[in-house]
Amino acid sequence: MPALTRRTALFIASGAAALVLTAANSAYADTGWGGSTDNGSKTDTSGDANGATLSSSASGVIVFDRSKNGSGSSAGAVTAAGSWTPPPCYYAPKYTPTQLEKYLTPIWEAESTGYQWDAQQRDRYVNGHPYKDFNKDRADKGYWWDSYVPESQIGAPGSLDCDKPIFWVDKGAPPPADVPQAITPEILAQLAYAEIRVPSTEVNLAPAGTTKVNLPTWAWLDTAKFKPVSVTARVPVLGIEATTTAVPVALKIDPGTTDAVTYPDSGACQLNTDGSIGEPYAKGKADQTPPCGVKYLRSSGSGSYKLQATVTWQIHWTGTGVDGERHLPDGTFGAAQDVVVQEIQAVNR
């Protein structure tokens, strides 16, 4: 019976055995990446492991350091350019010999997976074809590897492609050559990408909140509030890690109406040398053209326009055994803000 059916068997197992299995291997519903709902700055140590046990938490053996990530209720995940997504599944250490025994034995005892499959599994992991007694005599020399599905990719195309049976890898040895989805620094970088949270892109406007028809409205982002963020993902038991960094490079303004012009014409405001975008309004510049901004040509009436400010973030990563920086697809993150536009009233005498 293939590994995919083994996963299905976990769900159809009944009674106490099913409860034990679910607790022992939460990865079927989890399993680990892009699943954080906490935008705060912290290090997630739930995936840590030592020589005797591997964590059965959602993060498995991966530790995320989010201390340099964006934070706050308005922070959010970037949308990658094109069709790029994090890996839909991957393989990494999941069990020690004792843990694998505790995971598989209740499945066999539940007899819900069929005698033939149970016998094949016992032959593979207990009877020496090719593993003997769950490799307990090698407990300090390696780990059992199994598949994970990032939480953000559950149900996505390819999420069930990692269907190889659980396999053994000695410490310091590479995983089998026919397992392209085995965890690497590059895969860690991609998983860290999914954990990136960037700050809100609400821009400073002058005039703020309410402007006038045909009056240039200046827009800018301060470098103090607008800076790179990063997340590090590491697998302590393998001694590998990767840090993925997002750097703001441009701001795109959509006025929220076709009755407006943007500065520049494209609406794309580039990064200044000091890391800011645009230029703060100063007294006396009311009639000047802002380097970044918008001019509304029609009143918003009794309502307001939804100005959409979208920042492009350039993504790169560094990792174990990798020289220099390597790039991942750019990401974008936007936010809308209300702008009231009023007509300038004139009285003729």
Image: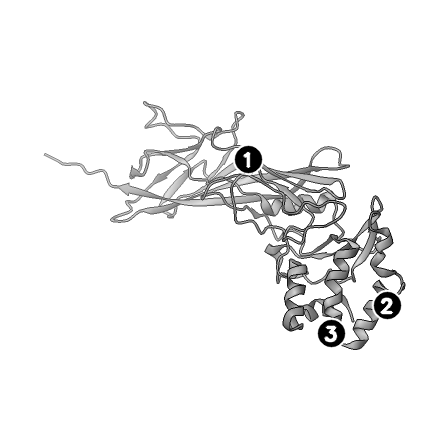
Of residues 113 and 292, the one nearer the viewer is: 113
- Marks 1 and 2 close (CB-CB < 8 Å): no
Residue 109 sits in quarter: bottom right
Q: Quadrant of the N terminus?
A: bottom right
In the visual, does 83 lie left or right of 299? right
SS category of the residue bearing label 1: strand
Where is residue 87? Give x, y as percent. 67, 53
Side (left or right) of 168 relative to 36: right
Quick one: SS at disc 3? loop
Q: CB under 8 Å between callouts 3 and 1?
A: no
| Figure check: 293 above or below 155 | above
Report the amino acid beneath label 1: Val
Q: Find residue 123 and name its label.
A: 2
Nearer the observer, 328 or 147? 147
Whichever of callouts 1 and 2 sits on the residue coming sooner in the sequence is 2
Between discs 2 and 3, the one toward the N terminus: 3
- Residue annotated with mark 1: 249
- Label of residue 113 in the image: 3
| Three-letter code for the amino acid on which mark 2 is drawn | Asp
The Cα atoms of the two marked residues, 1 and 2, are separated by 57 Å
